[in-house]
Image (cartoon, grey):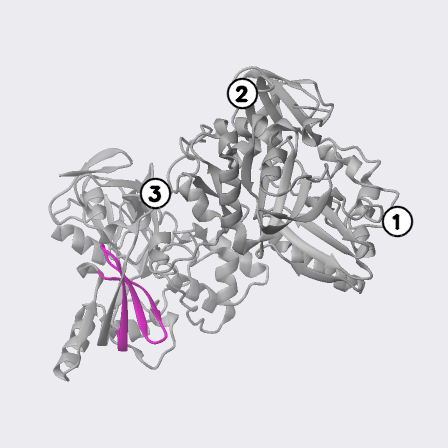
Amino acid sequence: MRFALDDQPVDYLDGDSIAVAVVRAGQHPQHGGALCLAGDCGNCSADVAGVPFTRTCLTPARPGLRVRRHPAVGGPPLRLDPPKNPVASPAQTSVQVHRRHVDIAVIGAGRSGTAAAASARAAGHDVMVLDSESGFEVVGVYPGPIVVVRTPEHMLHVHAHEVVIATGAADVHPVCEGNMLRGIVTWGAADILRERSVDLGRTVTVDLTELARFDGIDGQVTAVVFTDGRSTPCDTAIVTSATRAPRDLLARMVSDPGVSVVGPAAERYDLPPCPTDGIVCPCSKVTVGDLQMVWDKGFTHLELVKRAALCGTGTCQGGVCMPHLRAFVTEKSGAPAAPFTGRPASRQLTIAEAAADVFLDPFRRTALHDEHLKLGAQMDRFGGWWRPWNYGDFMREYWAVREGVSLGDVSTLGKMIVSGPDVVEALERLYPTTIADIRPGRSRYVLLLNERGHLIDDGMVCRESDDRFVLTFTSGGASFAEAWVRDWIETWGLNVRIMDRTISLGAINVTGPLAGELLRRVGVPESPKFLQHRHADVAGVACHIMRLSFTGEASFELHHPVAHSAELWQTLMLAGRDLNITPHGLQALFALRLEKGHVIVGMDTELDTTPRRINMDWAVKMDKPDFIGRTALARTADLPDHRRLFGLTMDGPAPTEGAPIYVGDRIVGHVASAFMSPTVGKAIMLGWQKHSPWVDTVTVDGRTAHVTDTPFYDPQGARARI
């Protein structure tokens, strides 16, 4: 029988664990270090059947298993090919949670655990014994008490009146020069291997107190050097010690009157000698020198040494390094160092196991979610919302916008009403463009900057009266918009009232050359002109109609009470049936806006993008006395800036977004957005050049691309104003 270890076949015998089979094959379950084969160390941690950080010493070998050692040698391949279905949810395992109520739960089936279970049963209690060899791997003990257990089939939550921890004690691993060589085992591991008839070759047994170092060649132990200078050749070094380490990690997790510890897990053993050389923490490869370095920097408490050196924070959670770490701190401080607090989980869990029985969808759904599903939409997560990626044929959706009429769900946009005596002053300070000259019924595109002059969002400012405005923000920016606006207004002490209506208002974008005709059919005989807005009933639903254009065609956003979203959507779809009305998703929208050269904040921009870098100086009025970010922009205005976002065109298919941009053999930037435009007849892109002097011709995907002015489509904007 065989399984695959790093894609190479390994034979095993019935009853072998993966680790035993690997040792039998003359290899190491990981890459080196002493083996205990009892689950205490991380030296047998591997990826087994796709589950990382699995203890191979506790996992039975099975035919066809794929085992990959941690850490893998070399990095994973860089995948640039787009996925076949970019909106498909990742494959995931559904993990169930089973629950069990008992009088007493005993963790551990050794001598002390068996005795505790027998005594409890004799007293008439309902007892459950949890032991890893029986498939019950305890990962945490919580107040209650509750014991969380991983089994091969499911997660198990054991609710008990009492919990008895009888996990025993572990062999102490050697810490000295050469202790990460292959071929070093503890006394307990040697017994397991002999019982499984594994040939250990020449063996040497050495007590920790007599061990000086291990010698080796090509990562394999070849000799044990004793403290008296003797050197004994060997194939396997067996380490013994009178010192034991209590397996008390679970006990250190919880303080609960219903939890008790018995047997060796409750005993206190002498610490080993203070280490002077070698790897103290095999999981994080922390050396004695690392401990000394952080000690010399002033980290002189055990918890601080642990955190500063990362000793005890790896896979085994201190199972190997705890005794030596305590010995080091005790020696240096002159006072006994108590063990650090244990934190769940004692065993590494997959995300599916950790989240079992818990469902939280952090992505919100619009009121039109079910309408999208009825129309066959493939939903994707964007800006904190579930949104239609496409409805099965994004090019059909694209042409519906360019040649007919289409609906888009833009309910996810941030929507806010601001009003009050000081509202104009507040908005003048918030935005880098002028606000006071916006007339009621008109709107203006605005950028939102932080104190550094970096772009954090964009949107529209719509004026309804002298002291009342409606603000819109991007879907991703809506979540912080209220806090941002409110914090600044409170800081300035201005008399302004704020109402965030992102959730209470839905919004449908009616767009395309026939958008006006569709609105006429549903009760809007005269639609607003470009950048105008007004309130009107649309198909009997009170709407705030905003005329703008992100698609490049005539567009009317219908903001309305969310309770009427489905009704309004269905009415519009029915009224436009003979116009071949087609809804569009994000895939088509991203292509349409790219043809117009519109920037998407967070997709085409970076954390430190300024208006100058994306050629939007026109949206900043530096002659204003003040606005957020003005000081930073003024300070950097005369400084050279080597970064700029350009429009690019090239023949052939569009490259992968994120593809590097070359000038000669030097990478100067990357492609932020790309689309093969049927209207333009070329691949169009927005891409960064981050080194000057900027050039007009670059190489992308092995092909020549030319810097091109934006918009790529309808540069005069006539179609948006039609």
Magenta-highlighted residues: 136-164
Name which residue lies at 49% across and 39% down.
574
Name which residue lies at 66% across and 25% down.
647
Question: Where in the figure is residue 196, as x and y percent of width and height?
Answer: 13, 50
Q: Nearer the viewer, residue 313 or 650?
A: 650
Report the quarter where the C terminus lies. Answer: top right
Q: Secondary structure at mark 3?
A: loop
| Residue 625 image label | 1
Q: Secondary structure at mark 1?
A: loop
Question: Where in the figure is residue 698, as x and y percent of width and height?
Answer: 63, 19
| Residue 652 image label | none
Asked whether residue 672 is in view, the answer is: no
Q: Nearer the viewer, residue 95 or 445?
A: 445
Disc 1 from disc 3: Cα separation: 55 Å
Q: Mark 1 near mark 3, Cβ–Cβ under 8 Å?
A: no
Q: Is residue 154 magenta?
A: yes
Question: Where in the figure is residue 54, as x and y percent of width and height?
Answer: 30, 50
Among numbered discs 2 and 3, the one appearing first in the sequence: 3
| Position of residue 513 in the picture relative to residue 194 (left or right) | right
Q: Nearer the viewer, residue 608 or 335?
A: 608
Q: Amino acid at mark 2?
A: Asp
From the image, state whether disc 1 or disc 2 is nearer to you.
1
Most frequent secondary structure within the magenta stretch: strand
* Residue that carries the numbered disc 2 in the rendered image: 701
* Residue that carries the numbered disc 3 in the rendered image: 91
Report the quarter where the N terminus lies. Answer: top left
**Looking at the image, residue 208 lies above or below residue 627:** below
| Position of residue 104 in the picture relative to residue 333 (left or right) | left
